[in-house]
Image (spheres, grey):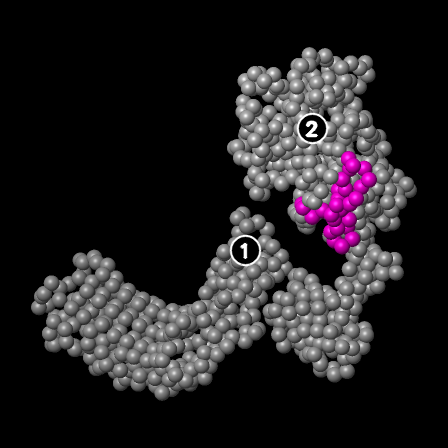
Amino acid sequence: MSVSTIPSFLNVVVDTLELTLVGTSFSSSQLSNLGTMTNVSLLAFKSDSAIEYPNDLGSPNNNIKILTLTTPLVAYSNYALPPNLVRLYVNAGLNFNFNKRLPFGVIPSSLKSIFIGGIGIDSFNQVLPQTIEIISISNNPAMGPRDLPSFEYYTNLTQLTLSGCGFTGTIPESYCIFDCILSSNNLNGTLPQCMICHPEDNEGKFEGNPNLTQGTCYPGSIVPNIDYNNITKGLDLYGTNLGLYGPLIKETNQTFLVNRPQSSFKLIWNEVDFGTIPDTIDIKISTKYYTLATKYLKPTIFEIKRSGTTFTFKGKNFSYNVNDIEIKILDIECPISYSEFTIINCKSSNKTLLGNSIKGTIQNKKSTEIIPFYLNTNDNTTSIQCSTDCNELLGNGKCNISNGICKCINEFIGNDCSIPNQYITSVSSVPTSGGVVNIWGWFGTVHTGLSIMIGQQVCQHDINSITSSFINCTVGAGSGTQSITLTQNSITYTGNNIFHYTELTYNCPKDCSNNGKCNTLTGQCKCNSGWGGYDCNSKSSTGGETTTSSSSSTTGTTQTPTPVIEIPKSNTTINGTDGSTVLNNQQTTYQISILSLIEIDFSNNIINTYDLSKKWTPVNNTNINIYTFTQTIQETCIITYTIEEIKTEREYQWAGLDLTLDKDSIKISVSIKNYTFNSVLNNLQLRFESLVGDNNKNTQENNECNNKDTEVDTSEIDKNQLLNYVTISRNQKVLYGRFINRVISDSRQTFITSSVIPNDNNNKESVIIGLNLPHCINECLIDPDFSVLVSSSYQECSSDLNNGRASWVLPVAIVVPCVAVVLIAIIVAVLYRKNRLAFLIAKSKINDIRLSKKN
């Protein structure tokens, strides 16, 4: 809009107004309405020629918040600014100054930001509001040469630009709290550490200063400290050279809020999203993560090295602040020159520091706790002596001179290795009516506050009957499998599912399918002639008994007619190199092998894994039906693996149970001797794999009608039964796995469980079973077994009818008693309890299974 006189703006409501004056001379009446901008927030004032600044802009009536002056103006005195001005941009040419100063009188107290371009000023001595936040002055070279001015008066100042203003000298430390741009000056010296250590905050901001050195961030320049208020959940991060912007917590990606740049930041810990705050958190400052303790943690020394009178301490729970930690050697302070969470360097003033047992102390000054250590300083590889003898004469432990901490054997804990670290190796069972429970293991000689819980019941004990390896107690009536919790000396040990109430009767799988008799004392079927499998639901050429029994321990007496069918024989091959067992029947192949031995902690986390597959060394055996293999782990732990072909049916006893081994079955035994555990809380798991597929022989021409995908059934895995079963079937052949939930530990029987292990390789043609062994010390004996049979759904193919061939296939049994030589404390895994895991698996062939010939 072009007018000769500026109109009134009293009735104009506008957020942003751009006003351009055309001409060189204006009367005061023409410009007087510049003082009526009561409803203008942003004014961009321009002119097409150099005119004098219109002082009416500073009228008290104006409510201008942002004013930009970006075209040539001249100044002849000090002018007024709008009274409520918040932001001022001035780039009005080299003549817009008054005596080389800003041409303004009183600066409004509301001003937060000022941006001054090249207007010909040679100094900056105006008193701006103390609460101003941004000051930017550029392209006024007449301001130099002089040192950078102080801005400490401005307590809220966060951004400072002094570019192209001719400043010389070094950058003061007071500039550390500002986001600075100091380019195109004549600065010299070296950047302060606060800027060097945060290059990500200062890229390009100091260019054009040829004599200014970037420098190096020195170790120890960044010094973070942290305090946590457990009531308010507030984290206070404070220290030196922490940066301009809020650091980041690694664990949660939370960012601290700036309280004061470089030195103070705050954050509220979110327990809802992140839970209880951990003892230590990692905070990213610049490009490095710093570990900080959220509460007092005892300083711990792992290693000390000496070079003359300089000592380097390595450990944990130290501090980045050299003033937090005090180290004394021979009661003389060793001044700390460098400190972080895991390393401290100090230099002693005592030059005669030689001896076998020089006493020292370390203390975090936030606590009154003083931790002693003892040095052997006769050479530069300084050793740390323990504060006690670790009960070494009793064999409880030994001093670890690398860190001055007692290294206790597994059976003891404590600073001096005097507290028994108890564990259970075996437990007797009692009837469901209750009774006396015998518990073997390691319990030490100190039994302060002893209590024993079996499930939710207190097991009453006689303190006078307790020894270091035996406890008995009386428990009330109950049922099923329970955990035992034993507490003494303020230490609690829990054996998961290691106790079992003996039932009066046990169920047989599928009630023996009405093809056999159930021995309810054990839950084992005795199949009728012509039938086989643990549920008597498969066909067998060997069969079971044809007579019935009047024993009170058997149920389900039946006499099922037996089909008169020729059954194709199965072929068993034992690989003399890798110890695997392969069973072929027509087109179907099963392979059974031992995969691994796993050490598992109390929370079922894997601690150690020992791959046992294809690492066996054969051992000569005079019995042609027995194959023996060995391998060694941990240097002293010997594992022996024995496979026996059962040529005739035989009865045998295992852990107090009367069991049967069928003809043509395979019996596997495993012995584990002298296994060394990482902790008394850990246990072992021995893993078997059963693999099924189609062999590469042309045996399917008369059996196509029985082709069927793989199915796995674990519904008979039950921790409350003595016998558990798993089946894996394919092409109407069935592999049965029987797992006995008992183990012999140091010649004593105790209870265990078995687990179905998820297949990490997603191999749907296999099933992996883990036998959960106790904490074995001397000897463990375990006895699972398997058998391969034919499904009752097997069909008679038409080609077989024409040839008069059989429609049933021979069952082949594999019996795997496992002998693990080690004393056991049992932690039992809960297995897919009473839940059927049956899944169909897409057809795939196991090609090129190489079977070694039996000698």
Looking at numbered disc 2 in the image, what kind of residue is underneath it?
Val
In which quadrant of the rendered view does residue 43 lie? bottom left
Question: Dot 1 surroundings within 10 Å: few (below 14), some, or many (20 or more)?
Answer: few
Q: Answer above or below: position of 674 versus 39.
A: above
Residue 811 visible in the displayed image: yes
- Numbered badge on residue 612: none
Q: Where does the image place residue 446, in percent across and percent down from the top left? A: 86, 49
Q: Secondary structure at mark 1?
A: loop
Q: What residue sits right under mark 1 in the picture?
A: 251
Q: Nearer the viewer, residue 125 or 725?
A: 725
Residue numbers of the magenta segment: 613-641
**Quarter where residue 484 is shown:** top right
Quarter the C terminus occupies: top right
Q: CA distance from mark 2 to mark 1?
A: 55 Å
Q: Position of residue 691 (x, y in %)?
A: 62, 36
Q: Secondary structure at mark 2?
A: strand
The residue positioned 32% from the left and 76% from the top of the image is 137
Q: Residue at x 77, y 21 (%)?
A: 519
